[in-house]
Amino acid sequence: MKRLYRTAFSLAQWGLGLAGLAWALSEVDLGMLASAVRSYSLVAMLPVFAMATADYICMGFRMNALLPRGTGLALSMKASLLCVGMNCLLPAKAGDALKILYLTRNTGQSFVTISSAVIWERLCDVIYLASLLLFTVPNMKADEIGVNMVMPAIVLGAGILGFFTLRHWSGFFHAMYARFLPSRIANPLSHLHSCMVDQVSLPWLARGLAWSACTWGTYFMSFVFALYMADIHLSYPQMLVAFTISSIGTAIPSLPGGIGLFEGAVVLSLSWFGVDASQALGVALFFHAVHFLPLALAAVIINGRARYWQKA
């Protein structure tokens, strides 16, 4: 049965990615696409690469801020590159699992401690993505494109309420784990609860959110410079809308690196503002390559040296 579920999930991922790519290509003139890509100048590309580099440096600083003290920036940077790069090569966000294994192997911290930091890193991303939706929806023609503020508001509200519930009645939940679950499950779950809820401090969370703001800010500026390079001129609210929808396309588990779904999301979001599909697909392919090829290469190198099976 598990094998059947894995097969169905894998087929759904492939279906999403291929459907997104097919849709992105459906109205593209390949001649115009090739012409658009050839028009990109090296000078115009440099700011895109610079912002992409800054984005991943900020990711390393964020990981270092969330991990236990003494982990070190170099190790945090390698773990971040490994994670994002492997997500470009493996399906279903497998890079996060490799990051946890890599950091557990190299820090001497427990699996649960590292997992809690990585989960909080992802929660920071969810918080910013949901916040982006809240800020961008008022700048969209929501009635025309079928988007509203209800879901991001529910996600943020449920997350905040859930955290404070777990924090306020922490003793009750720890007792529940011990009473109703086998010890092999209750003990790690209680430890995870302590790391993710009980031990969270405001300064620690503020550091994670601050570096997340830098991460998302540099990623957005990389997107902005890519649009300028492709001679696509939109207002900042419009670019923020396109960026947010494109980020959702990347966040949904599909093919490795969000291939297909990302391109479809970029073409769709830019089409709302009158950008031709060929021009939109050209910038999507370029932007995706900038955030795909170097990271995949770095991840392969780091992963090849990891030796997860060896004892620390």
Image (tube, rainbow, N blue to C red):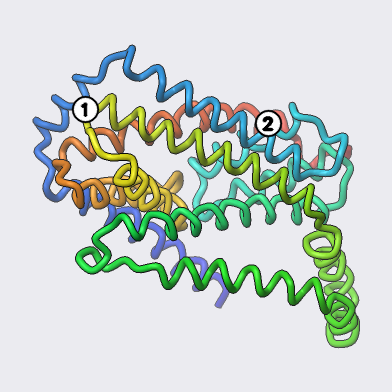
Q: Residue at x 63, y 57 (%)?
A: 123
- Mark 1 and mark 2: Cα distance apart in space: 33 Å
Give the residue furthest to the bottom: 180
Left or right relative to 66: residue 70: right
Q: Nearer the viewer, mark 1 or mark 2?
A: 1
Q: Residue at x 44, y 57 (%)?
A: 252
The numbered disc on residue 231 is: 1
- Amino acid carrying label 1: it is Asp
Q: Earlier in the sequence, mark 1 or mark 2?
A: 2
Left or right relative to 174: residue 32: left
Q: Quadrant of residue 312?
A: top right
The numbered disc on residue 77 is: 2
**Percent x, y for residue 187?**
89, 70
Q: Quadrant of residue 214?
A: top right
- Amino acid carrying label 2: it is Met
Secondary structure of the residue carrying tag 2 is: helix
Q: Is residue 177 above or below residue 33?
A: below
